[in-house]
Every structure is written in structure tokens, then in C-alpha cells.
Image: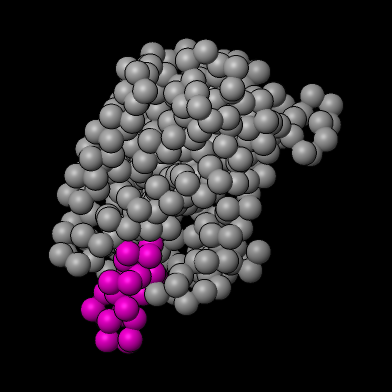
Amino acid sequence: MNGIQSKIAHYKSLDAAEKKAYIKDSLINNALYILLIIAVIYTYTQNHRFLSSGSLINIVTLSAANLPIALGIAGCIVLTGTDLSAGRVVGITACITAALEQSTSYASKMFPEIGPVPVPIVILIVLLVGAVVGFVNGFFVAKFSLHPFIVTLATQLIVYGLLLIFLTINGNNGQPLSGLDEGFNGFVKGNIIPTIGNVTIPNYVIIAAVVAVIMWIVWNKTSFGKNMFAVGSNPDAANVSGVNVMKTIIGVHTLAGALYGLTGFIESSRIGSNSATTGQNYESDAIAACVIGGVSFVGGTGKISGIILGVFLLRIIFVAFTFLSIDQNMQYIIKGCIILIACSIDMRKYLVRK
């Protein structure tokens, strides 16, 4: 509230020309949010079910499923980088989860000699797989000063190749992995929170909320988070200040990889049938959500609350596509425009500050 009051006071202190420039800058800097609001209003006028309780719950659950990957990739963006391997890591960890959690009675079980693996063990496995990929990304970025775009492009291809090989194990021949154990599905998609009316909150929403809280603590209350922002703002200055830049970069990417693994674990159950296309292009949605939420590519800027808001707003738009029956091909164009506009606004803010 004090921030709003200070902005109002600042506006009143300006002369006519300055007020005009201030309004213009505000409109440009908030253009994406304005367009999103207009899109929501338009969608509602075309289909009133868009803002029904069922639709809103659907938006919340879809946002929760995609929140961990966004929280992971946000750290890479804070370091002025990105991670193109994120979606493929989601894909391989989702398929690993599905293979280990197939029901004993499923005819096409990939590993018929073992029953469904205990959920805690599977979580540890996929977190480890994701963390290993993240460690490799961070190591090559930090050790050899390679651009994250190049490194993660390479690991994206490597992980995708490993995924294709994995899907051929035991004569599976690349077939989708389905027939998941009910106990596993209950852990991810069940609900420990009692249903209120027609509203059911699946467990993975709670998982995403817990992860968000943990990441908020990591970013804001630990030396690791402070070092991450310091390296993102100015790695040379951070190094002079005693920050271990290499360790920080590797740590951020490793943590990001683990979060991709958690996303794969959730997606495995949520989708139900996992294949080589699982996780494809997830990184583009996550990057768009981060930029919309205020995580800047110039480095050193970002908030967990902003990332959550960005994921939520982006998901609203995607759900609106469905209600407006927008062609799938056109959706890719709109997504690309959203990323382009968001990055342009972000860079404009940086240049103005500079």
C-alpha cells in the first residue's frame, strides 16, 4: 500500500510533460499485463464458462504441474542464462517414473520382473537424474565459460537420445508407457484435502506449493540465494567479494535439474501415457512464465511470487485458447509473440534503468 501511495505522490509532483511521459512508460512496461487482462475479458464475453469454478480449478492445477520447472529455469535466467534441456529432462524422468511405477498386472510392463517401486525411491531417482543433467550443464558453463544456450542445446540432444534408447529397453520398441499403479496415481493425483462441493485439489498442487515455499526460502533466506543474485548481477564483482562463482553456477543448474525431475515425476501420473514427446517445448512455456513474472534476462532480478504469477497468467492464456477454439498452429505463433514482447519489455526496462 505504501508503494502505491508513493507512486501517486510521485506522479502528482510531476509537471504536465513528465506526467505524459510517465503514463506512456507505465503503459509500455505493463503492456503484456494489459493485453492479458483484455484477453481474459474477451474470452469471458465469448464463453462465460471460462471463469467458472471448474475452469479456475483447472487453471490452478495446470499451473501447479508446471510450476517446478519454471522455478528451476528461473534460477538459470537470474544468472543471465537459460536452459533448453529442461523439457527433455522432464520427458526422460517422466518415462523413468512411468517404467518403475507400472502396475504388476499391466500386460506390456517394461520391467515385468519387478513390481511398482516405492514412491520415495522413485522420487529420489528422478531428482538424481535431473540433478546430474543440471550438474553437467552448470559444470560446462562455469568451467569453460560456455554460453548456457550452447551447453543446454547439447544436453537437450543428449538427453533426448538417451530417452529414445530408454524407450526401447526390454522390447518396448518406443511404445508409450502407461498402465500406472493406482497407489502411485493416488499419491500424485489423489486428494488429502477433503473435497469441498465440486472442488477437488489434487496432491500435486500441494507438492508444488511446498516446493514454492522451499524455493522462496532458498532464494531469500540463504547465502546460496544471495550468491546467485550476486553472480547474476555481476560475476566479477561477486568473485571479488568472496563468492565462489563456479560453485554457485553449478549449484543453480543442479537445483534446476532436480526440479525438472520433480516435474517429470508429476507429469508421469498426470498424463498417464508417457512417450518420447513428453516434456517437449516445456522449457519455452517456463521461460515465458518467468519473463512475464519479472525474472530478467539481464541477470540478478527475480521473485518467487512473480514466477508463480507468471505461470498462472500464462496458463490462463493457454486455457483461453481452448475456450476460443484457436487453432493449434496459431497457438505456437501467439506463444512466440508473448515471449518476444515480454523480453522486449524486460530489455527496455533495463535500458531505462541503465
Locate residue 269, reporting x and y percent: 56, 29
Task: Residue 297: name its quadrant.
Answer: bottom left
Q: Residue at x 28, y 43 (%)?
A: 84
Image coords of residue 319 (percent x, y): 52, 25
Left or right relative to 196: residue 254: left
Q: In this view, does 63 lie above or below 144?
A: above
Q: Residue at x 39, y 53 (%)?
A: 131
- Say whether residue 61 is left or right of residue 28: right
Residues shaded magenta: 228-252
Residue lying at the far front of the rendered structure? 113
Q: How many labels does the image show?
A: 0
Does 244 appear in magenta? yes
Is residue 95 toward the left or the right of residue 336 in the image? right
Q: Can residue 98 be seen in this view?
A: no
Q: Nearer the viewer, residue 251 or 317?
A: 251
Residue shown at 58% from the left, 31% from the top: 116
The quadrant in which the C terminus is found is bottom left
Along the line of sight, which residue is nearer the eye, 44 or 86? Answer: 86
Where does residue 21 sit, x and y in percent of width and height? 37, 57
Q: Nearer the viewer, residue 172 or 223?
A: 172
Magenta span dominant secondary structure:
helix
